[in-house]
Image: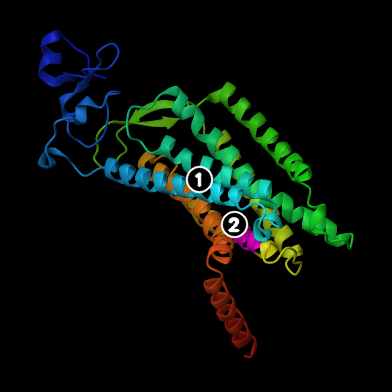
Amino acid sequence: CCNGTPDQINLYCFPCKFSPGRDFMLKSYQCDSFVDCEDGTDELHCSIKDKQPSIIMLSVAICVVVGILIVACVAIGVDVYIHRSERIFRENNVPFLLMILTGVIIGYASVFLFAQLGKLNDFICGSQYWFISVAFVLAFGSMIAKTYQVYALHREKSINITQFANITIIRYVAVAIAFEVILLIIWTAYDRPRPFTSTNFFDGKEHYYCKNNHFNIFAILLAVDKLVFIVVGVILSFLSWRIDYSGNEAREIRRTIVAAFLFACGIFPFLLVFQKHPFVKVTLICFGILGLCSLILCIYFLPKLISFHLPGVAIKLSRMSKAYQSKGSGY
């Protein structure tokens, strides 16, 4: 990225001190708040006045938030496992809960791959959509599989919580993961995303981002197949809307799926519009992942945790909800 005669290099470039091969970067890249050297030396020893506002500020903030959310997810998983014999967790099927939570954690972790904190490489670019796909199937695939079981058993007039076998849900999820893996393998073999540089950032300077050599058809296919998954989940949710089992779990799963569908419908058009704008695209992807994973935590897990640890608050919230529903039905 910085070529020329030795004199030109000394005049316009600076060395990345600890990088293998001692790469050189343009001096204009120093203290611009973008990490361009693999070792980060272009952003060392910079005063605040030297730094320019850039995506790095947003990236750092997102990564801090993601780190906190991952720790919270791990804490929830430990809490669920420790109290696995309690009725509220036992009836909701502990392995099922942990499988969804694992998907949420992987989803949050994928944000680190999209946040552009340094020089990208082939591994990071190739791993981004693998993480997203596995996370989506584990989290939403599990809920959609259970919703399908509810609908199928209701048609047979035999809703019984003991019939929601872990092995059946795991089979459905395994098939979905296999489908995603086949798509990803074909995509990786045909047109694996690689790091490129672009000046299409708001500061007008050249920075790294992940891009395919050809038309981004596989990325669109991966996004569309997830949208189809959620649409199927929404249809199953409406078909089984009045079916209840194990307390409020059926309702919570349906609400999570519908909320995810509405959220995805709001994000997806913007992703298509801003395909050629790396900064906006990465920001939207990070926001979308954070939003979908947080929906699961707030709508599906939070009510369970409140009911178990704060039963008094749960009772008050339940009464307020019933009062609101009865008031609404009176009009």
Name the disc covering residue 261, or none: 2
Question: Does residue 145 appear to the left or right of 284 in the view shown?
Answer: right
Between residue 218 and residue 155, name the one nearer to us: 155
Name the side, left or right, on which 226 lies relative to 47.
Answer: right
- Quadrant in the picture for residue 166: top right
Q: Position of residue 324 (x, y in %)?
A: 57, 83
Residues packed near mark 2 inside 10 Å, few (<14), some (14 to 19) or many (20 plus) = many
Residue drawn at x 63%, y 62% as measured from the top left: 252
Count of marks overlaid on the render: 2
State the residue position of label 1.
74
Residue range of the region highlighted in magenta in the rendering: 252-258
Residue 257 sits inside the magenta stretch: yes
Q: Earlier in the sequence, mark 2 or mark 1?
A: 1
Disc 2 versus disc 1: nearer the observer: 1
Q: Would residue 226 be visible to someone looking at this image?
A: no
How far across and down, in percent of the image, does residue 59 sit? 33, 42
